[in-house]
Amino acid sequence: MQNKGSRDKTGKSAYRFRGRVWVDGKEGTFLGYGRVVLLERIREHGSITKAARSMEISYRHAWELVESMNRQSPRPLVETSAGGKGGGGTRLTEEGEKAISLFWKFYGDFQKFLADDEKALRRALPGIRCLR
Amino acid sequence: MQNKGSRDKTGKSAYRFRGRVWVDGKEGTFLGYGRVVLLERIREHGSITKAARSMEISYRHAWELVESMNRQSPRPLVETSAGGKGGGGTRLTEEGEKAISLFWKFYGDFQKFLADDEKALRRALPGIRCLR
DNA sequence: TTTCGTTATTCCCTGTGGTAAATTACGGTA
DNA sequence: TACCGTAATTTACCACAGGGAATAACGAAA
């Protein structure tokens, strides 16, 4: 079968410039997309359990992410308490808020870079649409 | 133990802004760092077998990457021949050369973005060094 | 002291991406 | 025709990240 390759049915290039960004700490990933969404869900729900359910990840996984973030920050992004009223809970610290806004800034800049660079590369290499 | 968190022994922030970029085609990844290095090794060695060995990946994996790239391009990036003198071999096409230079341009732009944005974010948020 | 819902921890299971190895196909060359 | 080193393909196996379930720890309130 003939390979239509790089174009979709509209004739536009089917290639897309993609990527991911994250912030590394001393033991690997410190902040990434999923981690920051988790922080936001924790702020919203006040518990790791509910935050995990809302993201459809296991409590175990969510807890490990929280632990990893807290270990890599001089001050925890999240404070937990087990037992007590309502069984306990989890609350976002000021540090956590700052981490969220820092990451979204980074993330937003990156999305803009992707769009701009794709445009620039298409302009610079007219044949890019088919890698010609 | 006290969590030293975000600084290394020099007092500089231990956080690093990282990321990956790739080019998506119609069945997922089309070009990425490993794939492009593979293309270069194929150009250098003239065989998938030797290219794979030089990268310490399995022949199977290398072959799948080549297949995937060829399927997603209107013209193959790599041409293979089985049998014949020397048992056959693999050669990079003009299309393959273009793919390599396109990706490295994209990759280089991204590295620059990472450095610039890290600098900009540190300037914009003075407390970023400790997420303070 | 019992209850309750959460955090914290452990154990087992599984899907998956990959390697390793064996086998076949290939086609020039001697 | 036999040989050779590669491409192509199949099968078996393995490592491990993550899910799920089970259990303990916790501490305020009734």
Image: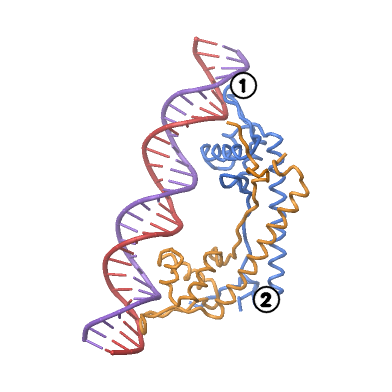
Chain colours: A orange, B blue, C purple, D red
Of the residues under marks 1 and 2, which one precedes in the sequence?
A: 1
Q: In which quarter of the image is residue B55?
A: top right
> Helix, strand or loop at disc 2?
loop
Same chain assignment for discs 1 and 2: yes
Compared to residue B115, the image places residue B61 above or below, namely: above
Which amino acid type is marked by label 1?
Lys
**Relative depth, front residue between A7 and C30:** A7
Q: Where is residue B63 shown, x and y percent of the image?
A: 55, 37
Q: Mark 1 lies on which chain?
A: B
Task: Give the class, few, some or many, for how many residues have Cα within 10 Å of label 2's Cα (few <14, many ≥20).
Answer: few
- Residue at x 64% of width, y 67% of height: A106
Q: Picture coordinates of residue A53 (x, y %)?
A: 42, 67
Residue pictured at 67% horizontal, 36% vertical: B43
Dot 2: chain letter: B
Category of crowding for the residue at label 1, using alpha-carbon neighbours closer than 10 angstroms: few (below 14), some (14–19), many (at least 20): few
With B28 as the anchor, is A85 left or right in this view?
left
Quadrant showing the C terminus of chain B: bottom right
Task: Name the mark on residue B125.
Answer: 2
Marks 1/2: CA–CA distance: 63 Å
Numbered tag placed on residue B129 in the rendering: none
Q: Taking D15 as reference, is A97 above or below it?
A: below
Q: Say which residue appears at 55% left-offset and 76% top-offset.
A: A96
B58 left or right of B103? left
Residue B85 numbered mark, or none: 1
> Mark 1 or mark 2, which is nearer to you?
2
Q: In this image, A91 relative to A3: left or right? A: left
